[in-house]
Amino acid sequence: MFDNLSERLERSFKVLRGEGRITEINIASTMKDIRKALLEADVNFKTAKTFTDRVKEKALGQNVLTAVRPGQMLVKITHDELAQLMGGSAEEINLKGKPAIVLLSGLQGSGKTTFAGKLANYLKTKKGKKVMLVACDVYRPAAIEQLRVLGEQIEVEVFTDEAEKNPVRKAQKAIERARTYGFDVVIVDTAGRLAVDAEMMDEIENIKNAIDPSETLFVVDSMTGQDAVNTAKEFNDRIDFDGVVLTKLDGDARGGAALSIRSVVEKPIKFISTGEKMEAIDVFHPERMADRILGMGDVVSLVERAQEQYDEAEARRISKKIAHNQFDFNDFMSQIQQIKKMGNMKDLMGMIPGMDRALKGVEISDDAFKPIEAIINSMTPEERSNPSLLNGSRKNRIAKGSGTSIVAINRFLKQFEQSSKMMRKLTLAQHQGKHRR
């Protein structure tokens, strides 16, 4: 669903590539692109503006670490603000009472009846609850039959009583049966309409007042975009629901509902649903959805790990040595140790955008640094501090001590030399950039 938005946001972040820091000037076009991307994803205009203003405010207040590029820092800030926009943290369903009563509301075609089955299956298999489904759509026999079929599929009792045409009395009868037979949860599936109307609102309000549910959920088709947000507001104004369910997240719509709905109705998104399978239901985690929207959620973890392991004093020391062409094997080993503290190599490589696809099926060993460490550890303290000392006889001794070969030693020395030159160029460029500013 979020593919187009993800691509647009990724292009927006690229504007900051190569910049030494985040400024009013270089972030302006990025924020403009992000706001445009959100609006094209059918996000509420006010929500999009407030969001980009918050991201800009946070970004300008950040000191960008030398170990993290400005673009990556902006990704993390955007990620955190996206998660906050969608609620900040997951909120569980309220199952107080014996039985707990869950009332479902929403328009016809929103996936409400299918979600009723999914929720019943989730509560039964994940929470160990004895669940009853109640078919309170007295207008559509197909809806009652659909719920009955779903109940059989997941082995959950479905209360139908097709002779009872009053949805309020039908719900009350079901709850009474549930109390008598020791059900833990009753899920009431109500009638939907093709559009919001007074009769529909009166009916759902009457049912809610009569059964006093512990949880009232509004089920919305996320593919309807901004219309879903408007409908949610109308329902919330009338029945004051407790949470939102987003269905059909596997569709190809623009996804604006997921981003806007929380800020407009100020109620948490509690579940998301995809497909028709009864297992296709998840508790809504704003952080994970932010990962999904950005399409580069692993960078967030990479930035956080870099921040955790970042030693500012050590970075300044090494930067100074690189600038004076004094970077040695001790410094190289220090950098390896910092990388290793961040986690195993496969995880770290997977955090780099696109690398998970590029390395699909490729095994990356946690022992990747071992040969290099063995080579450096086989050197004398003098050799580690002065790479130019390594002649033929010294290389031969180091090869024997590290269990490697002269070829491996020469390959490592070439890589070390290339890395040193590249780091020196970058360091000098940074210093020149600071002087120009």
Image (cartoon, grey):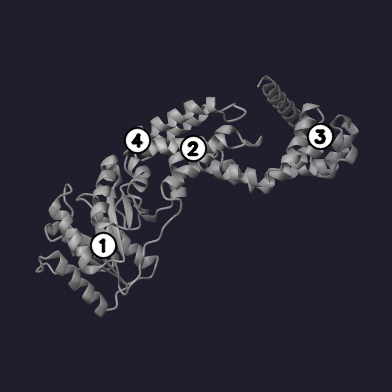
Q: Are marks 2 and 3 in contact (CB under 8 Å)?
A: no
Image coordinates of residue 63 in percent, x first then y, are 62, 36
Which residue is the site of mark 4?
45
Q: Is residue 325 above or below residue 133?
A: above
- Measure the C-alpha gap from mark 4 to mark 1: 31 Å
Whichever of callouts 1 and 3 sits on the residue coming sooner in the sequence is: 1
For the residues marked 1 and 3, what is the alpha-carbon distance in whole angstroms? 67 Å
Give amino acid for label 1. Answer: Leu
Mark 4 or mark 1, earlier in chain: 4
Quadrant where the N terminus is found in the figure: top left
Q: Are marks 1 and 3 in contact (CB under 8 Å)?
A: no
- Mark 3 and mark 4 lie on one chain; the one further toward the N terminus is 4
**Residue 319 in which image quadrant:** top right
Please rate how many residues cluster around mark 1, counting C-alpha atoms within 10 Å: few if below 14, some from 14 to 19, many from 20: many
Report, in whole angstroms, how far the alpha carbon at label 3 lies from the one at label 4: 54 Å
Q: Comparing marks 3 and 4, which lies closer to the viewer? A: 4
Distance from Cα at disc 2 to Cα at disc 3 = 40 Å
Give SS at disc 3. loop
Assess whether mark 4 and mark 2 are in contact (beta carbons under 8 angstroms): no
Name the secondary structure under disc 4: helix
* Secondary structure of residue under mark 2: helix
Q: Are marks 1 and 2 in contact (CB under 8 Å)?
A: no
The residue shown at (18%, 48%) is 196
**Residue type at numbered disc 4:** Phe
